[in-house]
Amino acid sequence: MVVYRRLLAAMIVLSLAACSAPAQGTPAPSASASVVVEDVPVSPFEQAISLLRKQGAALLAGDEAGWLAAVDAPLQTRYRKMFTTLRALDVSQFLYTPHLLSQPADPVMKIEADVTYCFSMGLCPTYGSGGNEAPKLRQTLTVKTVGGKLVIAAVGASKTRNSLQPTPWENTALTIRQGDRVTVAATASEAAKLDDVLALAESAAKLNDRIAGYVENPQKRYRIYLADAKAWRTWYQGDNGKYVIGYSINLNADGADVVLNMPALGRDQRLLATTVKHEMGHVVTNSGINATGRADTWLIEGIAEYIGWSPAAASASWRRPAVHAAVHGRHRPASIVMLPLADDAPLSKIDAFYGLGHFAMNCMANKYGQRALFDFVRYRLQNGFEYDDASRRAFKKPFATVDKACVAWIRATA
């Protein structure tokens, strides 16, 4: 008698389907053999895996009822907001990878779940693919039966959460505006500024899309979050310097999020416009970065300043007085390559650092052409070539020659 058993596999990566076949050489059952089908009891954890898989699929399908069916009544409002926000952000992957923390047969389960997600991507990297895997967050879920139905009864942050947590869309109600190339999301107190920022960002996208082509890092879409004071202190761990008014954070090698400190930006439209262009410049020049470390901060921030002030020259920047003081002072720089700033650097040194980087980019663009400048940026930040190799490829000159020429140019221009 041949027995076939029907099992629900406890899949770890929920996007994959497992299929089995008889081993090679196994004889088929004879026509006279009877077949018995047995139902094997499904464990609570296997049921939880199915619950999470169906919830993620419902989100991608736009099925709000299916998404909410996975959560208990007290969590409905939170998950409804999350559904609306994720759909508006063009979520294209949302996969749970669960790890059971409690005992397998426990009716109330504690589950640590990695959630991998992507936005606006037709093909999102799979969990554990290494190198350029999808961004992920980690949650601790309580799953139990309520009213005869298995649901997520509680959700909390894992003790081992990463630098991408908390995301802006996890716990915050956001108001969202969509343009042709940019999605802007804001906390309730900053929602009145959405239209202004969207208009600036759509204009900046035209410039940055062109630059993205130069550095071979095209973006499907740009995302900008407008933070109030509380969100600024918490989103993405909120570990920001005293004078930081915006940042771009890499989700993986294929994209980044921009976060703006709206209270610090105030009503200064020129500051807002340059900051939006600057941070979107980071997205295209830095999100696919070859990990070269903090030593390239002068280049990373310099090219973002160049983009932020475009088409104006570095001499138009409000950082020019700090640059002038630096290049004509007692400790004038001997190279355009500068050491990274200390975490507690005063504003005067910050202005000089960013300004010198901007002037260095302006010099290279003036002397060798803007396209050659972005080639140099690509060779260094995307490909990881040494400065001299990148310079010879982009400018057809040794980096020492470029460096010396630009130090002199900055002293004469600032």
Image (tube, grey):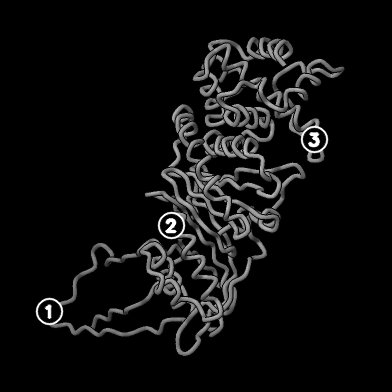
Q: Quadrant of the N terminus?
A: bottom left
Q: Is residue 46 visible?
A: no
The mark lying in front, picked from 1 and 3, is: 3
Q: Residue furthest left?
A: 31
Of callouts 2 and 3, which one flags the residue occurring earlier in the amino acid sequence? 2
| Quadrant in which residue 210 is drawn | top left
Q: Which residue is mark 1?
A: 31
Note whether residue 21 is visible.
yes
Mark 2: few/some/many CA within 10 Å (<14, 14-19, 20+) = many
Q: Which mark is residue 93?
A: 2
- Please give the name of the residue rendered at 82% of the width and 36% of the height, measured from the top-left corner: 346
Q: Which mark is residue 347?
A: 3
In the image, 339: left or right of 76? right
SS for callout 3 = helix
Indicate the position of residue 413 as horizontal and vertical percent values.
70, 13
47 vs 378, left or right, is: left
The mark closer to the camera, 2 or 3, is 3
